[in-house]
Image: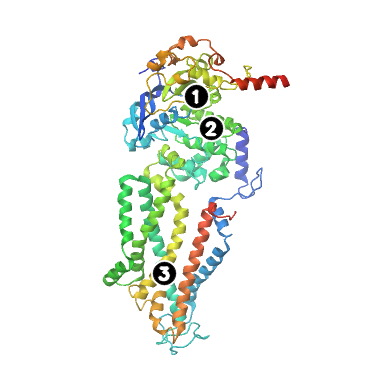
Amino acid sequence: MPEPSTTETTAAKRQDSKSGAVEREFTVQERGQFQLVVRRFFQHRLAVISLVLLVVIVLLAYIGGWLWKYGPEDITPDNSEAPSLEHPFGTDAVGKDMLANVLRGTQISLQISVLVAIFSTVVGTIWGAVAGYYRGWVDTVLMRISDLVLTLPLLAVAAVLAHNVGGSWWLIAVVIAGLYWAYVSRVARGVVLSLREKEFIEAARALGAGDGRIIFRHLVPNALGSVIVNATILVSIGILLETALSFLGFGVRAPDTSLGLLVSSAQTAVDTRPWLFYFPGLFIILIALTINFIGDGLRDAFDPQQTKVRA
Amino acid sequence: MTSFDSQTTADPVLSVEDLTVQFPSDDGLVQAVRGVSYQLDRGEVLGVVGESGSGKSVTSMAIMGLLPRTARVSGRIDFKGRNLLELSEKEMTRVRGSGVAMVFQDPMTSLNPVYPVGDQIAEAITAHHDVRKEVARKQAVELLDLVRIPNPQQRATEYPHQLSGGMRQRVVIAIAIANRPEVIIADEPTTALDVTVQAQVLDALQAAKEETGAAMVLITHDLGVIAGQADRVQVMYAGKVVEAGTVDDIFYTPRMPYTLGLLGSLPRLDIKSERLTPIAGAPPSVVNMPPGCPFSPRCPMAADICDREEPTLEPTTDGRHVSACHFRDDLAGREPTDLFNPTSVDDAEAVAAGEKNE
């Protein structure tokens, strides 16, 4: 037990040399929770490769699409041309450049899926956390509502809504998210149910923390690990659902475009002009796959007990 | 209920009167606390000892209002002229932390793993006071310094998993005193810690108490901790106070066989003894308790009256020292070894063999 005076001097010394290395008994580098997670994530090779690939796709879609000499609407004199240096992904029957269209479609598809992930994660987490924290009749009412939402068939709801409100990209995102938050709420509730029995929650209550403070400052941050993993998976689910909806004609509509719409409009050309079909298809698969691997890596990073990955 | 409260001094900050806590269960009513009364004066340390399941923790949880909703609580808990049992949840939230604060047993689980400890102390401050974050954070560093954490400036930015058990418990203490409560309830603050660290934590607790001037209820299994820290002691058994008095009363003139047994099971440096004297048996189930003294099945002095009538707390050596035993006067001057068999037969042989070898 050091004397108070020594404590003060060390504290003072620390303040003097804030930037310099702190003198410690052990020179083990300390890591915060966040750093640990990042470090574990980067030991997951497939996840890192996927992350790099996804970043490349995103940059390509936003910066590449902006730099590329043709816009998605531009009609070039070459129609139905196979991939060449002039048109790396070929052109369609009216002469639109396929690369520009795929990049534009990737933008829209990514926007939809990210919006789906954010919206359903925020709503689902709060919904589930409130249900799990209060239990009793609050839990019963909230969870029966989300059970009800889970029974609604997505395609039927989307078909009805698409007819009535039209197909702008953010509306599609809201429709998908409006049905998918219920999955998140179940995950969040499960996590919160076990967290609420932990002693630090009781300690927080003993400190005079109210319900809101306990839910948002203690329960939700501790549930974030599972929730973030879920959110990544939701991004890829969002991509695939958007594709399905656009393919069936309930999604994004021309003149705007998305990967699903590109695939659907090219389905008749699979044999004659395969580049129209396979390039957007390849992008869909790449995005969904990389995001799934990233989610895998995140899960391992947040929950080290389940794997042998060491930090 | 007891004659205990009438003799205490004038300035009680917390007084518990005839507190009863019952939990309905499938096997019947669990009587966790059966009529506990005490007063806690300003700046005083009350030690509460007893085995697991004797109702120590449930009593303190009742004071904090943290019992599960199924619990049936009756009696009075007066804190600054208000009965805490009658407060609404909202009013109770205001009392928790700023009026009565709690130090939990296990520092490994009572801190939130996702925030730096400095933030957690600051949060405790902002929960009750409308201060800016930076101000609260500065106070947090001062509090860490107060509970003797070296290098507080840096420690404040670290996460619970980066601190040792003793340090975490000091953080928990810092959180408990963050709002200058008038009563600190420390529920087995050293039980989960290494012996070498216990002294540091008790030191921090002492410093915290002196700084805030708070009264303290110190719950523990460890009579050694009580002897060093407490002003008064309360011995609990099967949901009841069976003996209460000053530290000297309890340690030197115990008037209840259970207390005597507890003291006999404690290793002591000042008295030479070959063996410790255990109390045979286990505490009774608190579901559907039979009439009579709950300690009688384990008590070497038990007589017929003990199975019929439960003794009440009555004064013994003086008014403040009370015990619940029909034979309290017979216990004067008895040693633990007079009552409890120190060794079983084969143990005695082993001791004898050991002596021969020497």
Frontmost residue, B344 versus A301: B344
Discs 2, 1 touching: Cβ within 8 Å: no
- Quarter holding the C terminus of chain B is top right
User: What kind of residue is marked 3?
Assistant: Leu
Distance between mark 3 and mark 2 Cα atoms: 54 Å
- Quarter holding the N terminus of chain B is top left
Image coords of residue A15 (percent x, y): 60, 44
Frontmost residue, B81 versus B333: B333
Earlier in the chain: of badge 2 and badge 1, it is 2
Label 3 resides on the chain identified as A
Distance between mark 1 and mark 3 Cα atoms: 66 Å
Residue mark closest to the camera, 2 vs 1:
1
On whether disc 2 and disc 1 are found on a single subunit, the reply is yes
Say the numbered circle drawn on residue B281. Answer: 1
On whether disc 1 and disc 3 are found on a single subunit, the reply is no
Residue B268 visible? The answer is no
Say the numbered circle drawn on residue B191. Answer: 2
Label 1 resides on the chain identified as B
Image coords of residue B252 (percent x, y): 53, 14
Frontmost residue, B124 versus B266: B266
User: What kind of residue is marked 1?
Assistant: Gly
On whether disc 3 and disc 2 are found on a single subunit, the reply is no
Residue under label 3, please give it.
A240
SS for tag 3? helix
User: What kind of residue is marked 2?
Assistant: Thr
Q: Is A280 drawn above or below residue B173 in the view shown?
A: below
